[in-house]
Image (cartoon, rainbow, N blue to C red):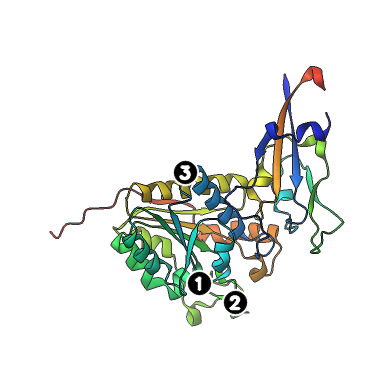
Amino acid sequence: MDIKDIIKPENLVYKKSELLIDTIMHYCPGCSHGVVHKILSEVIDEMGIQEKTIGIAPVGCAVFAYNYIDIDWQEAAHGRAPAVATGVVRLNPDNIVFAYQGDGDLASIGTAEIIHACNRGENIVVIFINNGIYGMTGGQMAPTTLVGQVTSTTPAGRNVDLNGYPMKITELIAQLPGTSYVTRQSVQTAAAVRKCKRSIKKAFQNVIDKKGTSFVEVVSTCNAGWKMTPVGANKWMEENMFPFYPLGDMKDSDKKEVSNN
Amino acid sequence: MAKVRGAVVVDKEGCKGCGVCVEVCPQDVLSLNREVNSRGYHYSYMKNPEACIGCSNCGVVCPDTCLTIYRVKVLESEI
């Protein structure tokens, strides 16, 4: 059978989502942002909520997310995406609002905003891309950098005495009563991508059902910042990031009724 | 007994040659081309097209969504 006989519209099994704008992304080869953008566009497309979805873009590499996914976007100041999302969802409670943040954005400068937005149980989805460094600015150490990990500001590896410990922000968020669904996923293999897509879909469904904050961390690679090949970075992530940032659901429940007694 | 045949169409200009699709392919179909596209990347291509089963793993992991996958069932009598 010839290849031309296989490439026919009726045999199509996988194609680019129509929500992804037909342009070449500025991300480095092999960047996890591209995969998460694709998952988001597929989920929004499949749920038919394109007209109702508002994304809050962070500061970081994903600042240009509004160039790639065909929904409404609002850009936020560094770390303030959950605060902007709070304002948007309170004024437009029928819209589906998600904040898309990296680890330098969410776990460092935006710690106060994310903790309090999740504690208030704002009806938003938070997508948290954790690659362990500040990718856009040149691979500096972030709060999530592993102990001993080499970055451009810790050339001899992160030293606990000098730089402190890496922060498991998702575990912190899972303790807050305002959150309904807290999970940690990854996107380095096809199985992981499909699992991550199910998690993101569930997070969006929770927002439609007004269950409170849903928080999806995606353990990601930044091969340019880590100074590795894309495939090598995926392997490094599996060997070094996953033992410290174990994958799986941390919380899956309704927003708790907390009494004063 | 039906056999499954697949095909991958690569958007040559969109591909950045990261090689993630080559790594996840269970049938060792894809490879990076010796030639480069207009932006200087060694784009992905089907080195071994007969082995493709159209599982879409490469398309699912592609960060730049430049792979389109087709799959068809072939009856033994048609091979």
Identify the residue under disc 1. A104
- Inspect the image, locate mark 2, and give the three-letter code of the amino acid beneath it: Thr
The CA distance from mark 1 to mark 2 is 10 Å
Q: In this rendering, which labeled residue sits more in front, label 3 or label 1?
A: 3
Instruction: Report helix, strand or loop for mark 2.
Output: loop
Q: Of callouts 3 and 1, which one flags the residue occurring earlier in the amino acid sequence? A: 3
- Do callouts 1 and 2 mark residues in contact (Cβ within 8 Å)? yes
In the image, farthest residue toward the top = B77
Residue B5 at x, y percent in the picture: 75, 31
Q: Check the residue under mark 3 and report the chain it is in.
A: A
A40 and A191: which one is in front?
A40
Indicate left or right for A174 with A37 as reference: left
Residue B42 appears in which quarter of the rendering? bottom right
CA neighbours of label 1 inside 10 A, class few (<14), some (14 to 19), many (20+): many
Q: Residues within 10 Å of mark 2 (few under 14, many from 20)?
A: few
Q: Earlier in the sequence, mark 1 or mark 2?
A: 1
Q: Residue at x 43, y 46 (%)?
A: A202
Which residue in the protein does label 3 denote? A47
Q: Nearer the viewer, residue A35 or A226?
A: A35
User: Quick check: A113 left or right of B17?
Assistant: left
User: What is the residue that sits farthest to the front in this orientation?
Assistant: A51
Subunit bearing disc 1: A
| Dot 3 alpha-carbon crowd within 10 angstroms: few under 14, some 14 to 19, many 20 or more | few
Can residue A166 be seen here? The reply is no
Residue type of the residue flagged with mark 1:
Gly
Can residue A130 be seen at all in this image of the molecule? yes
Labels 3 and 2: the sequence-earlier one: 3
Give x and y (percent) for residue B43.
79, 55
Give the residue drawn at x 84%, y 59%. Answer: B36
Q: Nearer the viewer, residue A67 or B65?
A: A67
| Residue type, mark 3 in image | Met
Which quarter of the image is occupied by the C terminus of chain A?
A: bottom left
